[in-house]
Image: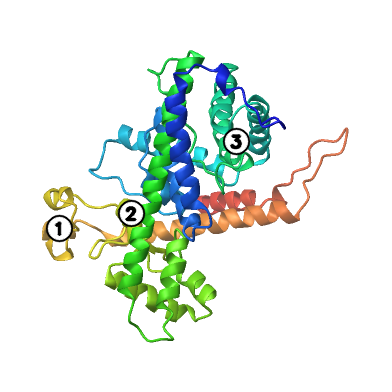
Amino acid sequence: MREDGQTRSERLPLALAAALEHAARAVARLDSALARHPLAPAWAWRARLDAVRRQALIDGRAIDPWHLAALIEGVRFRLGGSPALIDRGTVFANAHHAFALYRWFSGPDEAQQSAIADAAAHLAAAGDDHSPLLGAALGVHAWLDQGGERPPLRAALATYWVARGVTPLPCPLLTGARALQADVPWAREAWLGHFLDALAEEAEDGLALLTALERYWFAARRAVAGRRRDSRAGHAVDILAAAPLLSATSLGAALGMATKNATRLLEGFVVLGIASEVTHRGKRRLYGLKHLAPLREAAAPPRRPRPGRRPGRPSAASPAVAAAGGAVPLATVPPLALSPPLPRSQREEFEFGELDRWLDLADQAIRRAQRVLEYHATVPTLVPAAGRPDTDTRHGDPTRLSADNTRSSRTG
């Protein structure tokens, strides 16, 4: 904004006044609620999930936000209803697209940071002479009209609100995603109104999300109230509410207690119904308040060997049980049939005396081959001298000696 504090909002159409007032009121309420709120980290995590869900939907890649949460936390997500192979591929492709969008807000690489910086500079230059909301709307329209990409612009918007003093922390939820639908007119004056309405809707949803987080937090505090004075359950609930997901090791480090005691405390919260374990794992488990229960439903348990199932590929002994999804007990698997015994007449036809004679001949052939190899490895080959007839070398060749011995034995 210019140093004299004046803006050029009056030059825009008056039809934007109602949309601008609605958006300013909604964003101001969200700003007031988030200022120094203890649940701001948990809200930011949930807001990023909701923002990526909206943006992926506009990009034509609808995604369950809890699938994205499972992917972020390294947990396999569940595919309900055993969809077809092509549908499974679509779900995984959408999940990876949403994860790529999430990376723009959390942990961008150097190339992404450079693109975000360019988009942020564009927003600052385009909206410097206007109020923050109108400046953002004009900057977004100009960026997209010039062929700019959406992901760096969305990430730059999250920091734009902090730079202009609109929100106390980066807010990826305020991107006006609904204004990029195909049926929204692209003329600037008409599109600005849609963008402001989308901002107002996102701010209202963000405030509702914060209210829901507060409700789960207060319910958890009431559930652990009345314990002894030195109990750390209340502090554990506060930490669990502020952090989106928490392990027993992290909770123990934050409270200064043993990991085993922190695990017992978290498992007690699960029994009380105020927390959920979202990974289905036996180790490296993650806990969250009850508002993260959908994440547990979306997460698939780790692959474990089914009881009673043999190693290797499953057999087709019981197709009905396999189709029902159950394991085939060992008792129901029919054993392999034994080979039928040979009749006595066929057993007597085998003559094993000839077999011994052929084994002796094979041993003789093996010994003969070994002598030949040893001879060629130790005795150099005799080369006949020039101008002389070839010298008979049969006396040094064991193969010729064996052949001569054989002929002599036959003539004798």
Earlier sequence position, callout 2 versus callout 3: 3
User: What residue lies at 59% left-to-right and 25% top-to-bottom?
Assistant: 139
Residue 135: x percent and y percent? 59, 28
- Residue depth check, mark 2 versus mark 1: number of the one nearer the observer: 2
Packing grade of label 3 (10 A; few <14, some 14-19, many >=20) is many
Q: Quadrant of residue 343?
A: bottom left
User: What residue lies at 43% left-to-right and 15% top-to-bottom?
Assistant: 185
Relative side of 259 to 67, left or right: right
Q: In this view, does 89 lie above or below 214?
A: above
> Along the line of sight, which residue is nearer the eye, 333 or 105?
105
Residue 237: x percent and y percent? 41, 70
- Looking at the rendered structure, the secondary structure element under dot 2 is loop
> Along the line of sight, which residue is nearer the eye, 140 or 318?
140
Which residue lies under the disc numbered 1? 337
Packing grade of label 1 (10 A; few <14, some 14-19, many >=20) is few
User: What residue lies at 40% left-to-right and 18% top-to-bottom?
Assistant: 184
Packing grade of label 2 (10 A; few <14, some 14-19, many >=20) is some
* Amino acid type, callout 2: Ala
* Amino acid type, callout 1: Ala
Q: How far is disc 2 from disc 3 in space, using C-alphas?
A: 34 Å
User: What residue lies at 60% left-to-right and 57% top-to-bottom?
Assistant: 370
Which residue lies under the disc numbered 3? 156
> Along the line of sight, which residue is nearer the eye, 275 or 196?
196
Residue 168: x percent and y percent? 56, 49
Question: Can see residue 21?
Answer: yes
Question: Can see residue 289?
Answer: no
- Looking at the rendered structure, the secondary structure element under dot 3 is helix
Q: Are marks 1 and 3 in contact (CB under 8 Å)?
A: no
Earlier sequence position, callout 1 versus callout 3: 3
Q: Are marks 2 and 1 in contact (CB under 8 Å)?
A: no
Which residue lies under the disc numbered 2? 300
